[in-house]
Amino acid sequence: MKVKGAIIAAAAVMAVSAAANAATLDDVKAKGFVQCGVSTGLAGFAFTDANGVWDGFDVTFCRATAAAIFGDANAIKFTPTTGKTRFTALASGEVDILYRNTTWTLSRDVDLGFTFTGVNYYDGQGFMVRKSLGVKSAKELDGATVCIQTGTTTELNLADFFRANGMSYEPVPIETNAEAQQKYLSNACDVYTTDASGLAATRATFEKPGEHALLPEIISKEPLGPLVRQGDDQWADISAWVLNALIIAEEKGVTKANVAKLAADGSADPEVNRLLGKEGSYGEMLGLPADWAVHAISAGGNYGEIFERNVGESTAIGLARGLNQLWSKGGILYAPPFR
Amino acid sequence: MSANREPFVASGDIPPSPPPSSVVGPVAWVRENLFSSIPNAIMTLAGLFIIYSLLASVIPWLFVNSVWNATSLGHCREIDNGACLAVIKERYLQFIYGFYPEAERWRAILTFVLMVVAVWPILFAGAPRKLFYFSAVYPALAYWLIWGGTIWGPVGVMLGPIIAIITYRILSTVLRGTSMEEGIAGVLALIAAGLAMVIWWLLGVELFDGTVSSIVSIGLPVVESDKIGGFLLSTLIGVSGIAGSFPLGIALALGRRSNLLFIKAISTGFIEFIRGVPLITLLFVASTLLNYFLPPGTSFDIILRVVIMVTLFASAYMAEVIRGGLAALPKGQYEAADALGLDYWKSMRLIILPQALKISIPGIVNTFIGLFKDTVLVSVIGLLDPVGILNPIRADQNWNGIVWELYGFISIFFFIFCFGMSRYSQYLERKLQTGHR
């Protein structure tokens, strides 16, 4: 294990040092598209439609990035990555940016040689139980059997939580979310625990979702966001500011529907004008066209629209905004000022 | 005693009366095979009950209550409580082709049809022998059809073996003229031929492609590897793996039994190394580590990398299966071949291998079937083979939560392929049955 780690680290250093010399933006412009690493399939976040076109929450952010650079949300190619291949795909330069529900942790940011450029979804580990159990709080779960994906951080969080509260549990190890659904529904475990967004998405697929409840406790922080290779600040800035622009757009009420009109006519709000390239030369600073944010917003709307369309309460997944609400509305989404 | 009371004399043969129904006919068959003793009767009844309960749940689910026309899983559940086959109806093309562009799908179909033609002379004796030439060029043709681009690249690659053969012919004639020992001369010529081929592939092909393309450019629209998925990808990896591992396996098996230390060491080392490493590890090497070791900027196609790894992996197992066949031949066969004055290659080709391969058929087909099923492992490295493509489909809000229908569909495909291979091997064993075993 140690040797393997060393080899991977050495290889990553080689690749990063090779990649750091090249400006990713120039490479991307030369080949004419952004290569985006996404999940191989996660409900609401990355999936393919009937025509084989990638769509979903993470996918739309990637498309917005491509739109900001090329003015075309389809100037993009997707590489499906698994939990095991995602980091090497990014480190080796196979993908330019990774939008794959990746939790921002210290070791990934520092040791693996990546730069996290923001958080597009604040998640946390939750619990799902059958309502018939009568459990109202995760603290009442002493002695429960718990379905848990092996080899994940959720497994460690679970152990921490039960130990901290002086409770015992019996783990039922599972490999995939699909397996967990079957096990949970066939009563092989009392509780299923994974990221709260995943729980909600899973519950939505049940025949009788009303018979299951998500417990109020969220026992971990899972800030999920995009990451790029360390050492290319321009590219990291672009990735960060595309995300920020979409959040600011929601804050300022710029939507997919009115962005073209606002960009043409201008707005009374100077920050909107700066955002849409009417004032200042912010695109130039990033190495992008002046109207980059217009294209990014046109790709899938602002943050709120992307959320609602892919995972929001009107969809089958039905996630509430929660922490992912704007700071001004009780959440923690907060983008630095656009000036 | 009156005249009309003659003693009974049979005037002809009495026709045999039918055996009692307790000995022949369906009743007897049932009694003998299903109810011959009390434990057997219990087992039969239990078996019947299991079959009945399986069918009683599967048939209504799959045929009676299944839903073909719906837009989502929820819609399916509103309509009926059986299988939601609407997902198959909507997505079966993705299962077959992956994301292969619709306008180009004829190429995939043509490749498959031509594959049948190319395989025909290899598998069945009745085919015209000239088709073998087609089989030989088929891999390049298939590559060109699937990936598109200019035709001259694949043609250049196919020139490699031809160059190797020419080099070998020339060198072995030249070296035979010298005072060198014949075995060593042969090996030297072989190594030189291999080197010539590799050098041509590394340096010559691109030049050839560039030059000829600038004169006559023939090409198809390029389809990139990330568009290739589904059964197309499984078949692609499986068939190329099978086609590549068989000759490579024979070579390795012969190499391991060779008297030449160098060749023996290389073959043994290769086989033991590959067999000592799980396929998953090799796939990870193909998908991630190779990227690090190749010079930056070279993009070596991921499917090609995987095909190479799968082929190497299967060839090591194949080598051991064939070595088993070689070891099973009596020593007399080798001596007989020597006594006829045949050289090494001729004795192998005419005497030893035909018998050894015949013995190894079950093991060979076993390896093939295993290889074919192992292709689903590529989903672990993010390739969208049938199992890999399940994830993005199940992640679609409309179909999230569907399990059995999709996995069932995939297993039917694999069953058809693997069962077909198994039946073919039985046909081959019967055909090659010469009765001394």
Image (cartoon, helix red, strand yellow):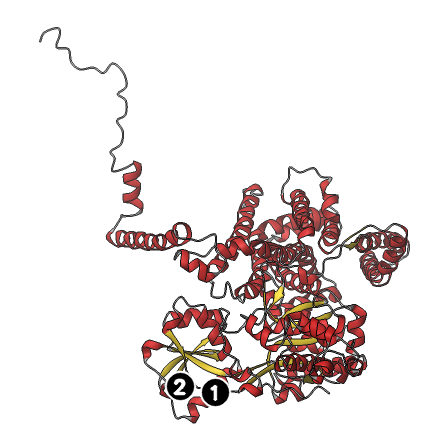
Q: CA distance from mark 2 to mark 1?
A: 9 Å
Q: Quadrant of residue A248?
A: bottom right
Q: Give the chain letter at badge 2.
A: A
Disc 2 on helix, strand or loop? helix
Say which residue appears at 49% left-offset and 55% top-offset.
Answer: B86
Of the numbered discs in the image, which one, if any, rests on residue A138? 2
Q: Are marks 2 and 1 in contact (CB under 8 Å)?
A: yes
Of the numbered discs in the image, which one, if any, rests on residue B305? none
Three-letter code for the amino acid on which mark 1 is drawn: Ile
Q: Quadrant of residue B91?
A: bottom right
Q: Position of residue B81 (x, y in %)?
A: 38, 57
Q: Looking at the rendering, in which quadrant would you find the C terminus of chain A?
A: bottom right
Viewer-nearest residue: B279 or B353: B279
Say which residue appears at 75% left-offset and 44% top-offset.
Answer: B133
Q: Which residue is mark 1?
A: A219
Three-letter code for the amino acid on which mark 2 is drawn: Ala
Q: In the picture provided, is B47 more to the left or to the right than A300?
A: left
